[in-house]
Amino acid sequence: MNSSDNKKLEYEALQEFIKLVELDGNLGSRVRVAMNEELTDRQREFVSLYYLEQMSMTEIAHNLGLSPSTVSRTLKRGRVRLRKYLKYNGRYFVDALSE
């Protein structure tokens, strides 16, 4: 598996993780807590717009009066923070999913 494949898998896994926020109940609450604890306000806003609202980076940039590169960098930093969180705390979510 090459670097591109790894990034695609990480992206897909992160998308699924973010979508758990939409769930009701205990697991959704824990995911919201993780996003609130790990992401800055701006990162949380961009992650929500990009992953949950399915807006493109260009749309986010246009709507907020920012450059697409600013949106891209902010999303990347948010993904890195969530990836680290998943690495250290992901087992908690996997266990909750199998309950």
Image: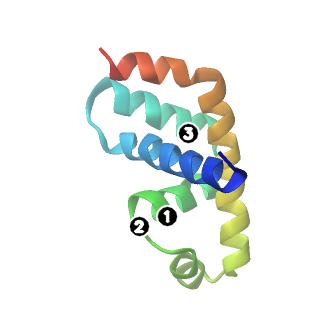
Tell me: residue 71, above or below residue 3.
below
Q: Which mark is residue 36?
A: 3
Q: Which of marks 2 and 3 is in front?
A: 2
The percent coordinates of residue 94 (x first, y second) are 44, 22
Are there few (<14), some (14-19), or many (20+) residues within 10 Å of tag 2?
Answer: few
Real-space CA distance between mark 2 and mark 3, rounded to the nearest whole angstrom: 20 Å
Q: Earlier in the sequence, mark 2 or mark 3?
A: 3
Q: Which residue is drawn at 54% across and 75% down?
A: 60
Circles 3, 1 touching at the beta carbon (< 8 Å) = no
In contact (CB < 8 Å): disc 1 and disc 2: yes
Q: Which mark is residue 50?
A: 1
Residue annotated with mark 2: 54
Disc 2 and disc 3 in contact, CB within 8 angstroms = no
Quadrant into which the N terminus falls: top right
Q: What residue appears at the point 71 percent right and 51 percent down from the top-left corner?
A: 3
> Which of the image's four quarters has the C terminus?
top left
Look at label 2 and name its amino acid. Gln
